[in-house]
Amino acid sequence: MRISVLLGCGVVVLAGCGSMPVTGDVKAVDASQPGDSQVQVYAVAPREGAPPSEIVDGFLESMTSDDPAFATTRKYLSADARRTWQPGGTTTVLAQAPNRSGPLLHDEDNRATRDRETTYTLTGEKVATVDAQSSYQPLAPTDYAQTLHLVLEQVAEGKKEWRIDVVPDGLVLGQSDFKRLYRSVNKYYYATGATNGRSTLVADPVYVRNRTDPVTRMDTATQTVRTLLAGPTNWLRPVVDSRFPTGTALRKGVTALAPDDQNVLKVPLNQKADTAGRNACRMMAAQVLFTLRDLTSARVERVELEGGEGRLCALDADDAPEFSADRGSEGDDSQYFINDKGQVERVFGATGDTGTPEPVTGPLGAGTVPMGSVGVARDEERAAAVSSSGQHLYVSSLETEGELAEPLVTSGAKKAEDRLSPPSWDGRGDLWVADRDPAGPRLLRLAGGTGEPQEVRVPGLDGARIEELRMSADGVRIALLLTKDGRTTLNIGRVERRGSSVAPEISVEDLRQAAPQLADVSAISWSGRSRLVVVGKEEGGVQQVRYVQADGSTSASGALPGVNQVQSVAAADDEQLPLMAETVDDGIVKLSPGDNWQTVLKKGKALVYPG
């Protein structure tokens, strides 16, 4: 039904292409097979006299194409459906390409009716949806069924053809087609409420079309800026805001954005942007810079925003880190772990093999109380540790010697596995820990890592127990391992703060399962601004380590090299630093980019990066 054009050879990317083929047969390409993102697929219009089954198949195939404005795709629809069909609505993602069955027959059908109208059913296993905001929502696999109604429509005098007159809005794609056509990008907004007197950018992942979007005719960068200007997705909206004035949009007719030969990216905006003050404009430029820096082949060194009356402001890439959520971690390349004596030790350097580990300064390194888990503040001035019994939580300086202070939290549970979880620090300097006591499970926050613990409401638990938690650097998202009915799943919650900044009311809202394909998750860690590394098993499968986006979609990085019997994982805010894992047989191992797993320490446990 379609012809594939290899844009990569001689047109877009010269590398790897010997020459443009000039002979040979034209071959059809199965749209549902995984393919190179450089392969562009064009739809073919329905042939004259095509039967209903061919019309349905052609319509499904054409939905997976790069058909401009879906003009060819609409030729499979009746005149009325052609005007009303909205391909830009919700996209349904199936495990495989949809199956077509039919025609459906009913008792009341007669030969005359079947000769002028018929119905087909589309079925499959639905695994995700992408809404009109481009927000991805993973789903536990569920049955999908939808009908297409066809009629014989007059297309010319004395000439009728089968066309689809009842069709659901949006696209229906198999996973392989979806991954070929779309890519995950992060757009950035500011966390509501200043963090230590500064504004922090938060990643909001969405999916945009690879290359040119058939509906808007915009390239990928322009699509991404368009979604940025449209505002945050509904899930993140309660905890972030944008510095772009309401109504700000790209100037009419802008369909392509790319840096010039000086790596300066100019973004033309409408007149609504002219109302922004200078400081707000710089913050707007930071949103664009962070959003686009991974999208263009050339590094964007400078962003210039243009309003209705000319240039508004500019921001250099060297000045952008002041808005980063992870800039407070000065020693991000160091790791901390607990040795066999219960002392907290530090490994200097990102490689984990730059010398003998040393006990940290202060009482946690002295080992007066053996510890079982540790969490280090992102500024690396303090650490929190849970005793080896799991009963007590201590906070201590990593810069000065002294006696170990009294525990800030104590669990009353009888069993060690029912006591305190490993602690985690957010980018605001707050400390979080879960008390797993069956008699009174609690999620606790210690503002600034000191004082009386505050219980945090988690209304969406529905009887599940928090086994482990990890706070994001921006402080507005929390990853939770929840156990219920013998299964442990990964969930992401939104941290909402209400009331005064001195005594805020804090809750974790709108929990959503982030890895529904994994039946049991045993370890997690944030890895960058909007990605997690997850250890778990699929139903009936073996343990695997993989990257998962914060919206629940599978990262382009996919599954990681196999490693046996992983008990915990640790990743840094900087995605270029090694991934660390604690294993049963090999001790603590590391995985550097482009390398295989290597043993770092034969003895040691609970290794963590700051945070």
Image (tube, rainbow, N blue to C red):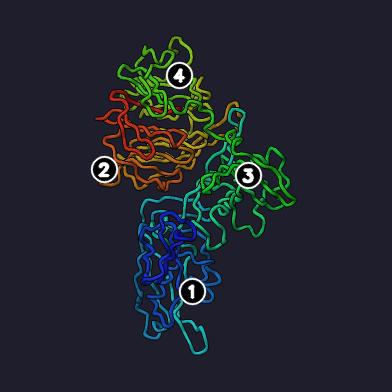
Q: Which of 13 and 319 is in front in this view?
A: 13
Mark nearer the N terminus (1 vs 2): 1
- Residue type at mark 2? Val
Q: Of all residues shown, which one is farthest toward the right?
A: 309
Badge 2 crowding class, 10 Å Cα cut-off, few under 14, some 14 to 19, many 20 or more, is few
* Residue at which label 2 appears: 542
User: How many numbered marks appear?
Assistant: 4
Query: What is the three-letter code of the residue carrying label 1?
Result: Leu
The amino acid type of the residue labelled 4 equals Val
Q: How crowded is mark 3: few (under 14 residues within 10 Å), some or many (20 or more)?
A: many
Q: In whole angstroms, how far apart are the C-alphas of marks 1 and 3?
A: 43 Å
Residue 463 in view:
no
The residue pinned by badge 1 equals 77
Q: Which amino acid does label 3 sit on?
A: Val
- In 3D space, how far apart are the residues under numbered discs 1 and 2 (Cα atoms)? 46 Å
User: What residue is disc 4 on?
Assistant: 395
Q: Position of residue 581 (x, y in %)?
A: 34, 32
Q: Which of marks 3 and 4 is nearer the N terminus?
A: 3
User: Within the image, what quadrant is residue 217 found in?
Assistant: bottom right
Residue 504 falls left or right of residue 251: left
Q: Residue at x 47, y 69 (%)?
A: 167
Label 4 residue SS = strand
Q: Answer with mark 1 or mark 3, whichever residue precedes in sequence.
A: 1
Residue bearing mark 3: 303
CA separation, marks 3 and 4? 42 Å
Q: Distance between the residues labelled 2 and 4?
A: 37 Å
Of badges 2 and 3, the one in the foreground is: 3
Task: Provide the secondary structure element on which disc 2 rests.
Answer: loop
